Image (tube, helix red, strand yellow):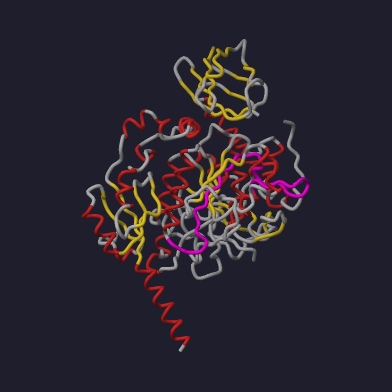
Amino acid sequence: MKKCLLLFIVLYCQSNLFAQQDAWVYLTDKQNVASSISNPISILTQKAINRKNAHGVIIDSRDVPVNEAYITQLKNTVGITVKAKSKWFNAVHVRGSETDIKNLKTTFPFINRIDFADKSLNTSKKVQEKKQSKFTNALVNFNYGSAANQIKMFKGEKLHLANYTGTGMTVAVLDAGFPKVNTMAAFQRLRNAGNLKGGYNFVNRNSEVSVNTTSSHGTLVLSTMAGYVENQYVGTAPDASYYLFITEDDLNENPVEESYWVEAAERADSLGVDVINTSLGYTTYDNPKYSYTNADMNGNTAFITKGTNIAFEKGMLLVNSAGNSGNDGWVIVGAPADAAGVLSIGAVKSDGTYASFSSLGSNIQPTQKPDVVAQGEASFVITENDIITTANGTSFSSPIMAGGVVCLWQALPSLNNEQIMQLVRKSASQFNTPDYFLGYGIPNLETALNNGLDLVELLENDLGLKIYPNPASSDIFFILGSQNAIELYVFDVLGKLVIQTMVTNSTPSIHIASLSNGMYIVKIQSSNQLKTIKLIKQ
């Protein structure tokens, strides 16, 4: 009798749970679009504006926030809970009964359309599988200790030797939980440098990201990039700055997590983040009616994938784990790693051979997936208790590679996200013969850097000049080519003009030793052209 009663309670709770539907409510318009775009500092940070200007990214209506008056009306509607919002989509993620959600369309004229997560409820028909990996000045010459193999596999240490360790670059880590990052010894170097910039918990709607949570997954992920233990462990981008965003609800599998991710990506964009690492993926949910199919992994169906495509358009570089479904029923790369604008990272063993759990690419996807691979089997990580250990999963191959990409972009600041991604792909071990197991293979970031320097020289030759070194600590030199003289303007991240001078063949350098370390925007005016580049002072 007790068993029957228990079964009845379970079934009742499940039916009651699934009676609550999730849906995206798309809105018709926004407030003050034109004035916001003409005064972008009102909606974006100066760092975000500088990044967009440096890479030719247009500030448009998608950067304007959602109308808060509309959100307030939805929040005040009986039976409706607002879970998330997206300025890129001008949409709100709501939860409620099917009837209550459908009634919104007839109640509020500012609603354009409603898209239910349960696709069978949409009038127009056009993850347990969310695989987080469980435990299964002078030249920089680090002692990498346990982490040596995973960075040397793609020649990331060569960038460190050239002093490209992430300085001036900003990374957002979107994950589940980051317990003890504010107290761990492994992140002391990061904190001392002021490079732990803060974060936000989009699930609980507070700034608590480092308290104990149900998951320490994000702490492990961050350690592969930013961890540092003298002579024992060095992450792949130890001197970058980091924002930590919780978007994953580890207790439930629900598409609202996709909306949390999009919110976090929007926040990252507004803060001027360069690179986003996501060691999450979405395919199936607790409510099977919300689940995707393999055919949906086509680079433009999942809400999170569409959000990722916008993030790429906004100039950020997205690095995402390919997934851990290589030997289970799902098999293929999941969302958002299916997006063309994502550098999706598969996993290999320490010897560079395929790790059997790593998700496979498919002809369903619009581009080669995975893009490249890094060590994801027996990856060395640091736990929240400051213990160096190993863990398996593309959850770790992704940030390991992301850190390397951060250092590469630091070295080539005038290139955009797509150019950096293509340099990484072209440097990989099987670029000419890619497959669905390793994609283009294991990158060689030393080769990518050399090829990138050649590309920068070609681009600079369009203006007839060459600039070196960058990053720089004391002096910058110019080869003017066909130009007799150029006007030079250097702005700090707040848009303040800090240097204005003329560079000629007789005075081909400027002195920058007095500038504070960090990123600057350099505008170069010749007789008939204007060029903007990013300069790193170190």
Task: Give the vertical position of 496 relative to 46 (above or below).
Answer: above
Name the quadrant containing residue 13: bottom left
The x and y percentages for residue 373 are 59, 54
The x and y percentages for residue 239 are 65, 39
* Residue found at x 62% / y 51%: 442
* Residue found at x 38% / y 28%: 39
The x and y percentages for residue 357 are 58, 65
* Residue found at x 66% / y 37%: 193
Can residue 429 be seen at all in this image of the molecule?
no
Instruction: Depth check: give the residue in front, 8 or 272.
Output: 8
Q: Magenta segment, principal secondary structure? A: loop
Task: Give the vertical position of 426 relative to 203 (above or below).
Answer: above
Q: Is residue 455 magenta?
A: no
Instruction: Depth check: give the residue in front, 304 or 108.
Output: 108
Task: Please indicate whether residue 482 sits to the left or right of residue 407 in the image.
Answer: left
Task: Give the vertical position of 94 relative to 12 (above or below).
Answer: above
Name the quadrant containing residue 67: top left
Task: Please indicate whether residue 85 sits to the left or right of residue 484 in the image.
Answer: left
Task: Please indicate whether residue 301 sits to the left or right of residue 523 in the image.
Answer: left
Name the quadrant containing residue 226: top right
Instruction: Depth check: give the residue in front, 203 or 304.
Output: 203
**Which image quarter is the N terminus in?**
bottom left
* Residue found at x 74% / y 31%: 138
Q: Is residue 229 magenta?
A: yes
The span picked out in magenta is 225-254
Task: Please indicate whether residue 183 sits to the left or right of residue 487 in the image.
Answer: right
Task: Give the vertical position of 30 relative to 320 (above or below).
Answer: above
